[in-house]
Structures are given as C-alpha cells and as structure tokens.
Amino acid sequence: MRPSYLDAYQNSSLRKVTDKAWALLESCSLCPRRCGVNRLQDKKGFCKTGLKARVCSYMSHRGEEPPISGSKGSGTIFFSHCNMHCVYCQNYEFSQKGEGREVDSGELADMMLELQASGCHNINLVTPTHAMPQILKSLQSAVKKGLTIPLVYNTGGYELAQIIGLLEGIVDVYLPDMRYADNKMAMRYSDAPDYPAYNQESVREMHRQVGDAIFSVGGIIERGLVIRHLVLPADISGTEKIMRFIARELSPDTYLSLMSQYYPCYQSADFPEIDRRISQEEYQKAQNLMHECGLYNGWTQESFGLARFAGIHIKPVAKNEQRDA
C-alpha cells in the first residue's frame, strides 16, 4: 500500500499543512497545554523544545508489536522531552531530562532515509507532537530524496483532535496510548489536566482517519489504529472504562496492545501505591475486561514484557479465547 504522504507531497497538501503547523509555533498550541510561547524565537514552554526538534536516538527497533517491528525492525526516532510528566516514565532520561541533541530539518530527513535504507518497515515517531511541524518539514525533504515507507505516529495520547486532524492524508498508522480514564489519576501521575477527554477525542479522530488496522500479506501494518494500554498498579489506569470506550465508541475490531511491562522507576518511589510491579491477578483482570467488552484483536504481554521496551514477549490475542480465560 502506497503511503498517503506521497500523494500529499505530489498535490502540495503536505507543503500547505507544514506551513499551517509551522505558523502554530509562533504562539504554540500544538497540544492541550497551549503554552502560547513563541517557539519561532526559540522560546520554550512545558515541553522544553524551541525552534529545533531534539532527538535522543534513532534505531531499527525490533521490540515493538509484531506487525510494527516485523522481521526487519521499525525505524524508530525518539524525540526528547514530552508534553506529559509521568512520574513513572521508563524513558525519563530523554522524555523528562532532555537527553539528546537538537537537529535541523535536513538531519531529521537523513535519519528517516538512513532507517529506510537499513530495511525498516516504517518510520516510527516516538513522542512526536511537540515536534510535529519540524517533522513535517523534514518529511518534505525526505520524500524528495526517496522516502517511501509509512509513518507511525507513536504518542502518549495527550493530544488535541484538531492538531491530529492536520495529519489526515499524511500519517497512515497511529499508535496512541490510552493511559487514564480518570482526571485525578492523570493529574497525580502525569500532570496532564483533562487527559481522558482530550485522549478520547483525539483517538476518535485517529480512528476516523485511518480506521481499523490493515496488514500486508507478510503481516506488517500498512494503515490503521493500534491502541496501547499500560496496566498500572491498583487499576490506576481505569482499564474497564477505557475498554468500554474502545468497544462502543470506536470499533470492536480495534487492535490493542495490552501491556504488563510497568515497573517502578524515575519518581515512582515517592508514590507508594505505584512503587511495585503489577501482579498476575491484576493483569489477568485487565485481559478479562478486554474480552468482556468483545475486544479480541491485538497482543498481550503475559510474561510481563521487558524493563524498557514493549514487544519481545507480546503474543497475539486469540479470537477464540473464552471470555473467562
């Protein structure tokens, strides 16, 4: 399947969207925080990112969900900083502390092309929203030089639906978190006011654009929505409400990645209720809730994942599993 951004490049809509996104940097309103700082003058708001995107690393990532990593890896670019402040963030060195370096649009385009040349199935943009205008500008250069693999928009899910709307016809694969169902939990653990409302509205927009996941003959995702749900201790994530939302408001055929990989790190020791791994019983309950809602597409992590990245232990959810399995 031909990536959508190739047509957007040819008909100049990619350039128009890039110009519109770039203009938003003058009084930044790319995410629900709407800091209003002038990033064109290199001012920095909550995300601590000015005019240039900051990148921690890029790599062929073989630890994502099977249809994203495939056999050759996902071409993953890790952007530094974030519009959330998760006290348990596993990637805090770059998401919170800013490890990495600033790159211009040419360098970012070259990263995409290098990942494609190494055989990666896609370009996987991790925590991209605060760098979205810079990504689009780089994408124009990369397409001109021969980029032809799909984009994966890999986000924590704290998004504005209207900003996601700008990406229609450019992004083919959305990989958002649905992290919380409760405002108080989102504030306490991620300093993300009204996360559930913003999250649900933006995920609706993602699904409207790309629908349920579509895979190649070889099992690689080509287009569609995959939702990640990290099971947190003591049901802090609100799994039941999130599963019911997905089944009722999106589609029972939605693909889910139900992650058990949570482990306490960064500032989690300051919050005793999350200063532990989840139990097998907690994870099993989350699986049961998923199945009770009629959701059987996706992947589980019954061996409790890895310390840092999802995917190695992810296995398919069997559609014929009993709901009380």
Image (cartoon, rainbow, N blue to C red):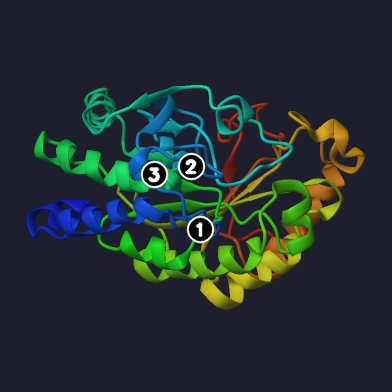
Amino acid type at circle 2 is: Thr
Amino acid type at circle 3 is: Arg
Q: Label 2 crowding class (10 Å Cα cut-off): few <14, some 14-19, many 20+? A: many
Return the residue nearer the eye: 70 or 278.
Answer: 278
Q: Secondary structure at mark 3?
A: helix
Earlier-in-chain disc, 3 versus 2: 3
Residue 163's quadrant in the figure?
A: bottom left
Q: Is residue 55 above or below residue 135?
A: above
Q: Secondary structure at mark 2?
A: loop
Name the side, left or right, on which 156 lies relative to 173.
Answer: right
Q: Secondary structure at mark 1?
A: loop
Q: Label 3 crowding class (10 Å Cα cut-off): few <14, some 14-19, many 20+? A: many
Q: Is residue 67 above or below residue 92?
A: below
Please give the residue where the numbered disc 1 appears in the rendered image.
Answer: 34
At 39% across and 37% down in the image, what residue appears?
42
Name the side, left or right, on which 199 lies relative to 71.
Answer: right
At 48% across and 42% down in the image, what residue appears?
127
Residue 307 placement (x, y as % from top left): 68, 26
Q: Is residue 33 above or below residue 242?
A: above
Q: Which mark is residue 127?
A: 2
Q: Nearer the viewer, mark 3 or mark 2?
A: 3
Answer whether labels 3 and 2 touch (C-beta < 8 Å): no
Residue 116 placement (x, y as % from top left): 24, 30
Q: Quadrant of the C terminus?
A: bottom right
Residue 126 placement (x, y as % from top left): 46, 39
Amino acid type at circle 1 is: Arg
Disc 1 and disc 3: Cα gap in Å? Answer: 12 Å
Q: Residue furthest right?
A: 272
Earlier-in-chain disc, 1 versus 2: 1
Disc 1 and disc 2: Cα gap in Å? Answer: 17 Å
Please give the residue where the numbered disc 3 appears in the rendered image.
Answer: 39
Total numbered labels: 3
